[in-house]
Image: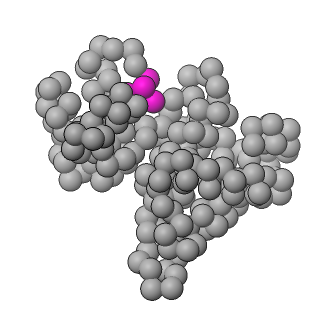
Amino acid sequence: MKSEIYNTDNSKKLKENSSKTIYDVVCAVDRENSTHINADKVGRQEITDRISDLTIKDFLKYLKNPKNLELFNIISAKTSYAGGIKYRTNQSFASKFCHYACFYMFSGENVQDNYSIYDNVLKKILPLYAKKYCIPCITNNLEDYSYYRDIVDKILEKSGNKISRNGFDHLLWYYHKGRL
C-alpha cells in the first residue's frame, strides 16, 4: 500500500488505485488481532469503503495527526445493522489499523508511533499504572480513545522510560494477558 499511495496524485481517492490492497490490509489486521469486525457480516467491507473514500492527502494527514482523531472516528463508527446482528463500533480495530498504517507508512519517522493500540487488556490495567504514577484516571472514561491515549502518554511521561507507545502496549499486554 505504501508505494501505491506515494506514487499517485494526492487528490485522488484511495479507492482509485488501492481498494483491493486496503481490503486485504483490513482483513489481515482483523484476523491477526482477533477484532471480529466481520461479526456483523458487513464490517470488513464497510470499513474498507470508508477508508477507500478518503483522498490520499487526507489519509496521510489524518495518520500524521492523531489528536484530531478523524481517521480513528471514521473507522470506528458503527457499522450497518445486518441480519439481526447488533450494530458494532470498532475502536479496537480502528486503533490497530491506524497504528499499523503509521508503523508501516512512516517507518523511521517520529509519526511512526502516533497511535496507541486500544484493547481490553490495557483498558483494565491502565488505572493501576495511572495510580502508581499519581495520574488521575476515571475508569469509565477509558472507553473514549482520546482519553485512553492521553492516560497512556501521561504514564509514559511520568515513568521516565523512553519506551514507545507500541513497546508499552506490547509489554503490558503480554505481561497481563493471562493474569486478568
Please count the marks in the image.
0
What x and y, as percent, mark residue 104? 64, 33
What x and y, as percent, mark residue 21? 75, 51
Q: Nearer the viewer, residue 59 or 27?
A: 27
Residue projecting furthest to the front: 178
Up the image or down, 6 lies above or below 25; here it is: above
Residue found 41% across the figure and 77% down from its top = 86
The answer to whether one can see residue 150 in this image is no
Q: How is the image coloured?
A: one colour
What x and y, as percent, mark residue 84? 45, 85
Residue found 49% across the figure and 48% down from its top = 33
Residue projecting furthest to the bottom: 84
Q: Which part of the image, by quadrant, shows the C terminus?
A: top left
Q: Is residue 76 left or right of residue 118?
A: right
Residue found 64% across the figure and 67% down from its top = 45
What span is in magenta? 164-168
